[in-house]
Amino acid sequence: MREAIMEAARAWWHLLTGAALAVLCQLMAGVVLFTAVLTLTVIGAGVLPETVLLLRLIAGRERSRTAARTGTPVPEAYLPLEGPLPARVRTAVTDPGTHGDLIWAAAHAVYGVALWCVSLVVWVCALPVDGVWAGLAGHRPLLLPLIGRLADLETDWSRALLTPVPSAARDAALAARVEQLTATRAGAIAAHGAELRRIERDLHDGAQARLVALSMRIGLARRAYDSDPATALRLLDDAQEQAEEALAELRHVVRGIHPPILTDRGLTGAVRALAASSGLEVEVSVTGLAGAGGGRRDAQGPRAPAAVEAAAYFVVAEALTNAAKHSGAPRASVALTRGPAGLRVLVEDEGHGGAEAGERGGSGLSGMRRRVAALDGTVRLTSPQGGPTVIEVELPCVW
């Protein structure tokens, strides 16, 4: 009997909080009416999106209560309230999720209070004062479970009213996807612009300057050839050095666009080369990719698309560079794994941690996120104070 009483008490508490929420819904009805009047006057149109956000907050609280009672989450699907005021007002008015919240709020304002009142009567009858309602007290095993059933009835109604219809869920998912792609496109454009500026700067300050100096030395050598062959020879030697330096600069620029080692040795070989030259003790593990066995000719597993390989290469390069410069770690590990939906890159160092997206040492991790987001991938960073720092990247691709 004690367990039955405790369960009934928990159910009654659920109904009590539901009744409190129902009173809030009744107050919300006045807020909605006031907002509607203000919106019709146009002057108060800016209040409508905020009212909708408040309604979503109340509905979200009911979803949490229902999920806590049943153990199953209640899905939600809303169109994003973003952009200029006219777009936000239009979204607030046309959002099917908001319409569903309004219907739930109107219904819950009634059944939330009604069910609690019924449960209160049952509770009083089931737990009588000594000598009073003794006949009902004998029926406690029948009365107490009724409170739980009332609570379950409330959660069933709330779940039915708050669960979005499939079309609304699709619209909300599509809107969220469009928003994500818009942000991704903006990030990709920013990353592309930064990359173009870097290439232009490298060409202007490096290869172009050396080629201009090379042209001048060749011109001076031609003039001095007849009158001072020794000087001409020295100038030609300088010109050869300038040509070699210009070629080195051009190779550096090309590696920044798409490292040739990726074409020659694939991602596995390129990452192992990065590990060898990082200055750290790096352990590389490869699962399901070409070159997993470690040899240049090892062809275990397929290769990812070139864009995915390039992104993974730059992720590893940036992560190892940050680890060598900022983490204080003597060791790191890199894991490349072929998954059913794409490529997974995991880089971990044993340093002091504290890395953030805006990042110690500059915008390295921010640039990494933009590069990965351009391929619809994800970056997860874990770097508590004291370490370790773990960067996990998922790059979707078709094998």
Image (tube, rainbow, N blue to C red):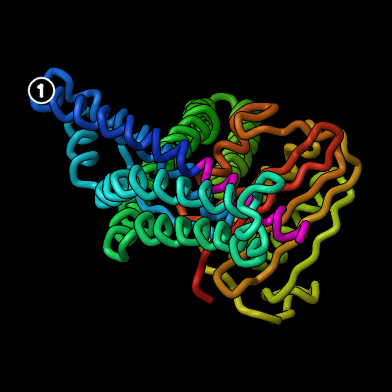
Q: What stretch is highlighted in magenta?
A: 1-17
Q: How many labels does the image show?
A: 1
| Magenta span contains residue 4 | yes
Residue tagged by mark 1? Answer: 42
| Residue reaching furthest to the front | 131
Q: Residues within 10 Å of mark 1 (few under 14, many from 20)?
A: few
Question: If the image is split into quadrants, where does the N terminus sit?
Answer: bottom right
| Residue reaching furthest to the top | 43
| Magenta span contains residue 264 | no
Question: As shown in the figure, which amino acid type bears the numbered disc 1?
Answer: Val
The residue located at (27%, 63%) in the rendering is 167
The residue located at (78%, 57%) in the rendering is 2
Image coords of residue 381 (percent x, y): 67, 44
Q: In this view, does 62 lie above or below 137?
A: above
Answer with the quarter of the image where residue 287 lies. bottom right
Image coords of residue 318 (percent x, y): 67, 43
Q: Is residue 166 above or below residue 332?
A: below
Q: SS of the residue at dot 1?
A: loop
Secondary structure mostly seen in the magenta stretch: helix
**Is residue 44 or residue 221 the one in the foreground?**
44
Image coords of residue 10 (percent x, y): 64, 50
